[in-house]
Amino acid sequence: MAAKFSPSLMCMDLLKFKEQIEFIDQHADYFHIDIMDGHFVDNISFGPEICAAVRKAVGPDRFLDAHLMIERPDHYFDRFVRAGVNLICFHVELGDSYYIRNTLGRIREAGVKNGLALNPATSFEAVEPYLAEIDLLLVMSVVPGFGGQSFMPSVLDKVEKAAEWRTENRASFLIQMDGGIGQNNAAQCALAGADVLVAGSSTFKAPDMARAIAEMK
Ligand code: DX5
Ligand code: ZN
């Protein structure tokens, strides 16, 4: 199965918000919305209002994937649920197993899909205990915080391990990769086992966005 594309809205031209949202609606699969609080990562980006605006623009059927890079996902996730996102992903580095399990469970109870992200420096073993309880595993291929960074091929090993684990354990979570993904490495990511590829700069900074997505596919 071909990988799905989830352009990162953080890299879009905000002066062309409506036009670019409509473009993604036609050419990509998911909408990746990066939420940063200036604490967990050294940057501040979007909040629930932008998620609600995207939901309003695309209608009820499109899949909005919110990547929370914030210190308190347990405190804030319900605002994103109310804004209309379909999936809420947060980072495994944030807390102990009680905190992670409890937050994963609460996100599902709120009626949306849950996801767990891991930074490049975090080992596969850190997420392994939760793989039966998640809908999506996000393997970061850059240190989170900013778009436009270089892809770190060393993380592909974790994608392969996650795909093997999924087969061996008959699990069904999706594997997503995020950071520095473009025409030169999309196939490599998909071959390693990634199902959803986030593509920020390679989509929105391309001279011909439709062509860029077509080439990645
Ligand atoms: C990084 C974000 C990514 C990123 C994607 O912290 O989670 O979604 O902005 O942008 P590119 O594709 O340019 O790395
Ligand atoms: Zn992201």
Image (tube, grey):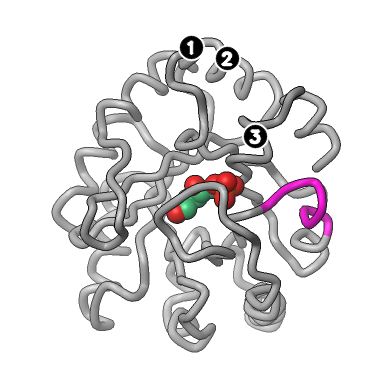
Boundaries of the magenta span: 181-187
- Residue 171 position, x and y percent, is 60, 71
Instruction: Count neighbours of disc 1 (C-alpha within 10 A) and say few if under 14, some if 14 to 19, many if 20 or more.
Output: some
The residue sitting at 55% across, 11% down in the picture is: 19
In this rendered view, identify the residue nearer to me: 179 or 162. Answer: 179
Instruction: Name the kind of residue labelled 2 in the image.
Output: Glu
- Tag 3, which secondary structure? loop
Whether 204 is among the magenta residues is no
Name the disc covering residue 22, or none: 2
Q: Is residue 182 magenta?
A: yes
Crowd rating for badge 2 (residues with CA inside 10 Å; few <14, some 14–19, many 20+): few
Q: CA distance from mark 2 to mark 3?
A: 12 Å
Estimate the spatial distance between the alpha carbons at disc 3 and disc 1, rounded to whole Å: 17 Å
Residue with the mark numbered 1 = 18
Q: Observer-nearest residue: 73 or 71?
A: 71
Is residue 206 toward the left or the right of residue 93 in the image? right
The residue under the point 26% across, 33% down is: 48
User: Nearest the camera: 202 or 190?
Assistant: 202
The verdict on label 3 being within 8 Å of ligand 1 is no
Which quarter shows the C terminus? top right
Given the image, on which type of amino acid does mark 1 rest?
Lys
**Above or below 166: residue 78:** above
For residue 150, above or below residue 171 = above
Query: Does residue 151 appear to the left or right of 117 in the view shown?
Result: right
- Quarter holding residue 90: bottom left
**Residue drawn at (44%, 51%) of the image:** 146
Labelled pair 3, 1 in contact (Cβ < 8 Å): no
Of the numbered discs 3 and 1, the one sitting upstream in the chain is 1
Front tag of 2 and 3: 2
Residue 205 drawn at (x, y percent)? 64, 32
The correct choice, above or below, for 30 with respect to 13 in the image is: below
